Amino acid sequence: MSKSIDIRMAHPYGMKAEAFEKALGIVEKALTKEYPDALIRIRKSTSMNEVSVFGFGKEGKAEVDAFLEALFNDSYLFEDL
């Protein structure tokens, strides 16, 4: 079974479009590095954030959620935004 991570991210109010695009790129790069055998798809959403995970087993979504939370808590990655 192939692995995939599909993320929809809402554009935060007040964030410039180019900064949001940069943030999407940071998330995609970090996920690709952490999960090189997974298909990573990051899309813009107009109203909600959502993470869908397939092919990672029973604890896969929790693992990816924890990775994303740690990523966003590492504020140095997003300092230039």
Image (cartoon, rainbow, N blue to C red):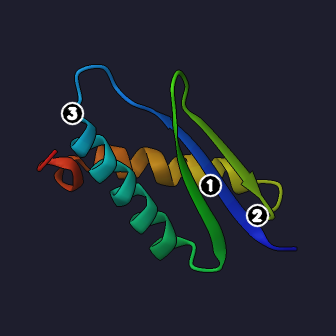
Q: Which residue is mark 2?
A: 56
Secondary structure under the numbered disc 2 in the rendered image: loop
The residue sitting at 51% across, 25% down in the picture is 46
Percent from the top left, x then y, of residue 49?
54, 31
Secondary structure under the numbered disc 1 in the rendered image: helix
Q: In the drawing, what numbered circle is on residue 16?
A: 3
Neighbourhood count class around disc 1 (C-alpha, 10 Å): few under 14, some 14–19, many 20 upward: few
Q: Which tag is nearer the camera, tag 1 or tag 3?
A: 3
Residue closest to the eye, 43 or 27: 43
The single residue placed furthest to the right in the displayed view is: 1
Q: Earlier in the sequence, mark 2 or mark 1?
A: 2
Percent from the top left, x then y, of residue 72?
35, 45
Q: Are marks 2 and 1 in contact (CB under 8 Å)?
A: yes
Percent from the top left, x then y, of residue 75?
21, 46
Where 12 sits versus 22, above or below? above
Neighbourhood count class around disc 3 (C-alpha, 10 Å): few under 14, some 14–19, many 20 upward: few
Neighbourhood count class around disc 2 (C-alpha, 10 Å): few under 14, some 14–19, many 20 upward: some
Name which quarter of the figure residue 48 lies in: top right
Q: Which residue is mark 1?
A: 63
The residue sitting at 65% across, 47% down in the picture is 62
